[in-house]
Image: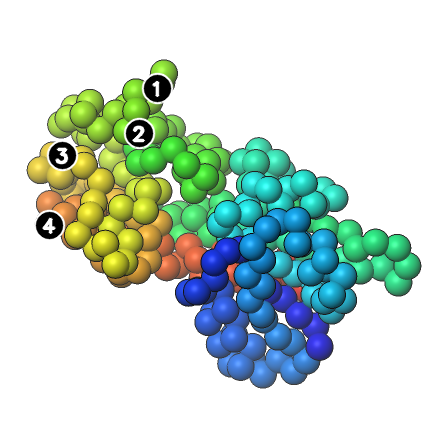
Amino acid sequence: MKKFGLIGFPLSHSFSKKYYDAKIAREQLAGVGYELYPISSIEAFPRLLRDEPMLMGINVTIPYKIAVMDYVDRLSAEAEAIAAVNCIRIERPEEGMPLLTGYNTDVYGFMESLKPLLQPGHDRALVLGNGGAAKAVVYALAQLGISYSIVSRSPLPGQYTYAQLDAAVLADHPLIINTTPLGTYPATGNYPDIPYACLGPGHLLYDLIYNPAETEFLKRGRAQGAATKNGLEMLERQAERNWDIWNMT
């Protein structure tokens, strides 16, 4: 059986497992399976590759998106620029070691889900958070020709703090993207501390969170007339891109 799977730790709840199991069943794909591999140390990854000779593709989630880069043979352009990998294609020649190529499909998923929503004037963005997810988002924004500013809790050169956000800043940034985990289930009452009263119909709020479907961030934006989007389609498009990468000939 050809196998694909997910590495990370822990893996108690997996969007990927549910998505690919449903895809395999819906498309009646025989001889294909998707498994969870909760490895407690990235050093266990080479053994997993040896123990699973039919493993042809891997998703990577926290805490290994950076550490796994030491175990791949080459990187796609976006994975190299972002310095994070969430998808690995495994090619297994008849002789020799497997060839591993690392990708970052967060970029593709975000771009493809955002593009249909963009209106004239959505050319300046505030990116809330400066972690790994933010790196994929700002790479995608650069590809789309959208200028951006980072908002973080600590003052850093060239970035805003939340305390610096006011009506003028929000008016100058009609696109606002939440890359922080604030508002994720079960802590659904949390939200980024921005001046929501300064939002209006010209704003587009995008939240990478998909559970709940409408975070407090999106709910407060919608109440001010802003357009909103959660992260579910980003995940779905990312998942399909992973599948294409694993199965390309």
Q: Earlier in the sequence, mark 4 or mark 3?
A: 3
Q: Nearer the viewer, mark 2 or mark 4?
A: 2
x and y percent of residue 192 in the render? 22, 40
Quarter in which the C terminus is drawn:
bottom right
170 and 100: which is toward the camera? 100
- Of the residues under marks 2 and 3, which one precedes in the sequence? 2
Residue 160 visible in the displayed image = yes
- Circle 2 Cα neighbour tier, 10 Å, few/some/many (<14 / 14–19 / ≥20): some
Q: Residue farthest to the front?
A: 40
**Horizontal and vertical percent for residue 146?**
39, 32
User: Mark 3 = which residue?
Assistant: 195
Q: Are marks 1 and 2 in contact (CB under 8 Å)?
A: yes
Tag nearer the camera, 1 or 3: 1
Give amino acid for label 4: Ala
Q: Upstream in the sequence, badge 1 or badge 3?
A: 1
**Mark in the foreground, 4 or 1:** 1
Q: CA distance from mark 2 to mark 4?
A: 24 Å
Q: Amino acid at mark 1?
A: Leu
User: How far apart are labels 4 and 3 at the CA level?
Assistant: 13 Å
Task: List the residue tagged with mark 4.
Answer: 223
Q: Does dot 2 land on a helix, a strand or a loop?
A: strand
Instruction: Say which residue appears at 65% left-offset and 76% top-offset.
Output: 32
* Residue contact between numbered discs 2 and 3, judged by CB atoms under 8 Å: no
